[in-house]
Image (tube, grey):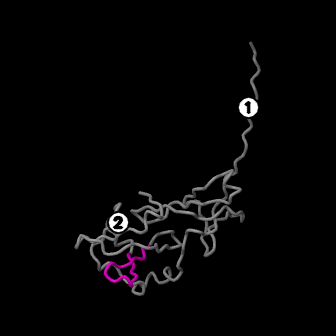
Amino acid sequence: MLQLSASLLNKSVLSLRTGTDIATVLAPIINPDSLKIEGFYCEDKYDKKKELVLLAQDIREVLAKGYVVNDHDVLVEADDLVRLQKIIKLNFVLIGKQVVTLSKDKVGKVSDYAADTSSMYIQKIYVSQSILKSFTGGNLSIDRSQINEITPKQIIINELLSKARVPSPAAAPNLT
């Protein structure tokens, strides 16, 4: 099921073993190469000064109230995640990235995204356009298949379809 970014954050992490919430999700860890949410930064309920990481693979179920995990032991410190160090150090933030086409036409900035909660892949990004373009075209929804490249500063997408004007058909002559 697709969920917007705001509905993925500020949720509780629930332990199956204790039946209580053990942390609160703060921010996603996004892999820019695959647009996958690899995990989430969390605030520990027992030690508020500790920022822990919940890996997406450790989530058993996503509920309206929060993320269900086996136990508090699945939350780890970021330094302990050797394989994810490169992605963690990138500190990739999707919202606010500039979106341009292959021909370098500016489209707008990412205002939101929708992720599939079963695979944790970002499926759609929502782009807010400039004030002038929003009068004529509104906000855009861009599917992950339309994305060509993601750089540290911008997202490059395929060319947008132009709104070509369709001529109205000429009135048919009355032959009666």
Label 2: which residue?
66
Of residue 40 and residue 132, the one placed in the foreground of this image is 132
At horizontal 65% and vertical 63% (from top left) the residue drawn is 108
Residue 129: x and y in percent read 65, 59
Residue 162: x and y in percent read 70, 51
Q: Quadrant of the C terminus?
A: top right
At horizontal 63% and vertical 63% (from top left) the residue drawn is 157
48 drawn magenta: yes
Report the predominant secondary structure element of the magenta stretch.
strand
Secondary structure under badge 2? strand
User: In which quadrant of the rendered view does residue 118 lie?
Assistant: bottom left
Residue 30: x and y in percent read 49, 73
Q: Earlier in the sequence, mark 1 or mark 2?
A: 2
Secondary structure under badge 1? loop
Circle 2: is it few (<14), some (14-19), or many (20+) Cα within 10 Å? Answer: many
Q: Residue furthest top?
A: 176
Label 1: which residue?
169
Residue 51 drawn above or below residue 37: below
Circle 1: is it few (<14), some (14-19), or many (20+) Cα within 10 Å? Answer: few
33 drawn magenta: no
Say which amino acid is labelled 2: Gly
At horizontal 75% and vertical 17% (from top left) the residue drawn is 174
**Disc sitting over residue 157 in the figure:** none
Magenta part of the protein: which range? 38-54
Task: For marks 1 and 2, give the CA distance.
Answer: 55 Å
